[in-house]
Amino acid sequence: MTWKTPTRRVVAAWLACAAGLVGCIPQTTGDLDHGGFTYDCTGSFDSACSGELFNQSTLPAAIAVGAPFGLEYHGPEPTDEDGTTFPVSLEPAAPAVLSGAGHAFVFQSAGTVAILAKATNGTISDFVHLVGAPIASIAVTDDGGSPQASLALASGDSVILKASPRDLDGNDLAGALSYQWESSDGSVVALGSGVSNNRAVLTVVGKGTAEITITIDDAKAVVEVTAGEGGAP
């Protein structure tokens, strides 16, 4: 069994990375060192994403159970002595723990699973291990990254809060999740648009106190907001 030379596009991308040029596709090398893997964010509300960048070269330390994510393999395809090339696709070694195929996957339960870059003739071109972990807590920060358990805001003030799912060790979990934001009193603090993802805009519309609750599956976080004329000192 031999290995077909990578396509010109892939080779050009590798060379671009080496030279620091546009068109670079940085990758995490597979365990067999035959090719590389890239993590694909399925939305800007994936904590593994940065701004508008939806393709990450560094694979996340852990991915939240139940959170969709994407993975791509960039490497050669096996070829037999007759010159027949066998296409490679991705599949999990333990589908009961990590479901999906092709480029889209979801952890169904916690665990460490190998994703195989497997050719149609059964040859394993390469593989990489990913970790799935349950959400243990939700960290809430402002847009600058400072933790926010409580806020004192003046009338008319607005603030952006970000929610990040974390594992038992306090590490951020990757993957696209559904976030639910609620204000206990909308006449005091109103939630703006975009409250279904990991960021929300809070605006003070009255005086008093309100609790902002963020929920991801069974995990919750609460931020207490005191709203009035003075706001924060």
Image (cartoon, grey):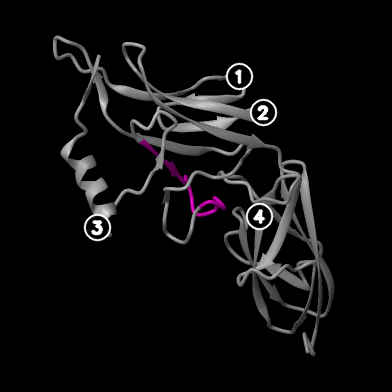
**Main SS, magenta residues:** loop
The three-letter code of the residue at mark 3 reads Ala
Residue 21 placed where, x, y %? 24, 59
Q: Position of residue 111 (x, y in %)?
A: 65, 29
User: Which mark's residue is nearer the viewer, 2 or 3?
Assistant: 3
Q: Position of residue 29 (x, y in %)?
A: 40, 38
- Tell me if label 4 and label 2 are in contact, CB under 8 Å: no
What SS does tag 3 mark? helix
Give above or below for 232 relative to 85: below
Q: Does label 2 or label 3 sit earlier along the sequence?
A: 3
Q: Is residue 59 left or right of residue 134?
A: left
Please report whichever mark, 1 or 4, sits nearer to the chain's N-terminal start.
Answer: 1
Say few, some or many: other residues with alpha carbon within 10 Å of mark 2 (under 14 / 14 to 19 / 20 or more): some
| Residue receiving disc 1 | 96
Are the residues flagged by discs 2 and 1 in contact, CB closer than 8 Å? Answer: yes
Residue extent of the magenta highlight: 36-48
Is 43 contained in the magenta span?
yes
> Which residue is labeled 3 in the image?
19
Closer to the camera in the image, 88 or 199? 88
In the image, which disc is placed on residue 164?
4
Q: Quadrant of the N terminus?
A: top left
